[in-house]
Amino acid sequence: MWSNSEMVIFCLILSPILAFGFGLFLSAISKNTKALGIVIGSILLVAASISGFIQVDNPKIEGVWFTLTDKAAKSISLGGTIKWSFILDIAGRLMSFLILAIGGLVSLFSTWYLSESKKNRRYYAGLAVFASSMLGLVLANDLICIFVFWEILGFSSWWLVGFYNSEYYTGKNAKELFIINRIADVGLLVAILITYSLVGDTSISTIKGFVGMVDIQHPSIFPMVMAAGSLFVLTAFGKSAQFPFSGWLVKAMAGPTPVSALMHAATMVTAGIFLLYRVRVLLPEQLLILISIIALLSAIMAGISALKTSNFKTLLAYSTIAQLGIMIPGLLAFNGIPTFIHLYAHAFFKSGLFLLAAYLGHKAVHQLKVDSSNQYQFSALGSLSGSTVNRALLVVLFSALAAMPVSSGFISKEILIVAIEKVQYPIWQTTLLILFFTNSFITVLYSGRAVVLLWGKPSAEPETIKKSDYLPLGILVFLSICSFWWVIAGMPFGGKIFLFAWAKFEQPHFEFSAILISLSVSVLSGLVVLTWFKGKYHKTIDKRYWYKPLFEVLSRIEQLSSYFKLSYAELLHNLIYRPVGNFFLSIGGALSLIDKRLLDSIINITSRFTVIFAHFISTLDKFLVDGLVNFSGYFTRFSGRVAGKYLQNNRLQIQVSWAFTMLFILFLAILLT
């Protein structure tokens, strides 16, 4: 009989699939294509609300995958039992709420977005599998469980990104996503094996206990810890689209835009960061500093690439790469809590931005009759953003992305700064801070540019909102409200409701220096955005305008960003994709040569020998076998004729002659014997 904690965990993991099954049943009865999404979204939102009020103290369930024999265990120098386990700790509870809430909102939004689609059952099935796999991943307390759900997550993401499978480029991009993630996932499998050989168990709780009892810097175990940590980082970078795996995320924008709000904002791409948060104890400080520098450089490159793009979704994709990059330095202090806080804040405002892109793009296709290949271009969307509601959504969501004061992004980035300031090595601390604020400034640049391009001109007619727009706009307004400071700042208080349960975490304290620096960046950012607005709406800039020099600098940066975007793509292509591709082409060429020169020669010689042998057998069959058969036939016919003529004759004298002959032969035989 299952306990209450076991029931809670399994119900959370299976809730999306159960919701899909129930919604499929109701939609089949009602014949309403929207019923499926409405039922799934409603159930997931209810499940998210319930998960927020669960007051259980880290319930944990575990079992045994399989048990090795003593001989097998000794042969691989490992223990004999492989276990699985799940835990509903505060991190898992927060992530479960996030997945269920964003998943429910995306399902409801999709009923409006896919109202004309005939493949919504396949879409919602993929969404249910994806959400369940993500829930299993965040609640897993065992590396084996993480690996299982990690692979299911990769499969379901390929499923959703390739939803528009009638388009060639969509299937191609989905396959590239799948292959690149599978290459990185090899690191996870090897890391699990190294960790198991080191600790003797794959439970995360056991691993933390092991690290707490031993010195991971000891020369006897440090190489294995470093190897396992590096492989975990490789896997996380693959899933979170960090350098050198950044290329697939932009191409994954080929899928339905509401999917990106869930996959590329709140769940899938953050799975790599969440994995590093779980296994942080196996990441030495030297490794954390190194990967933080790589991640921040990757964020800067992605931010500069976003500066010149003319596509709203592409800008959000580059922005996601950048935001994931700045989360990694939060692992340097406070047990990685700053990383988790920014991950949580980022999910709300980035989901809102993706759904806003979906809303504007959908309106561009259906109202302005824009071609679907250009529906997310700034030039097409700018004319739709003149309403007060759209402008307010733009300002609030991009303010959170740019870390403006009173937004959740401002608080979460502030905590990341505090974590960087805890680095003990001054030179690395300074380097990380410079890279972090460079990225913050670039974030403000492309956020301000996007707001300017999407601002639009106010309509001359009175603003009216159609009834069909109530659902998508209501969801966007809710996500905008969640992008304010109280989502993060209110969490340390209380503890009764799950959203305010941060008191159980080790709290990073705010420091005056971090707040002062953040406010300075915000003031400078406001100046930059104001300059951009002034430059856009004043066609000719007179010398008397104080912002002319700054506007010229910004124009230069915008021009250079176009070249750097190309350089970034070429960098990935020249350093990673081309050498890897050439390596496999070389292997293919060598195998082709072996096949042509060796295998084909062997096959040709064998075939010729077979032909000669076949001719020999044919000749033997013709002259020997056929000769014997023909001789036997001739002899049989001859014997038959003789017997018919001389033995089967009715003349009496012939019969008497044969009788005396046989008696004579018998008499001779008796005499001779």
Image (tube, helix red, strand yellow):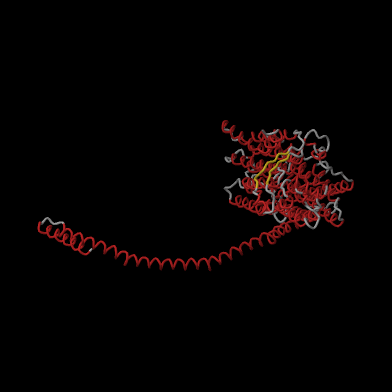
Residue that sits furthest to the right in the current view: 512
Q: Is 145 situated above or below 428? A: above
Q: x%, y% of residue 159?
A: 61, 46
One can see residue 265 in this view: yes
- Name the foreground residue: 485 vs 208: 208
Q: x%, y% of residue 155?
A: 63, 47
One can see residue 384 in this view: no
Q: Is 84 situated above or below 572? A: above
Q: In the image, 74: left or right of 432?
A: left
- How many badges with numbers are in the image? 0
Q: In the image, 298: left or right of 159?
A: right
Q: Is 451 situated above or below 39? A: below
The residue shown at (80%, 58%) is 219
Residue that sits furthest to the top in the current view: 30
- Residue 559's image quarter? bottom right
Q: x%, y% of residue 408?
A: 80, 42
- Name the foreground residue: 487 vs 230: 230
Which image quarter holds the C terminus? bottom left
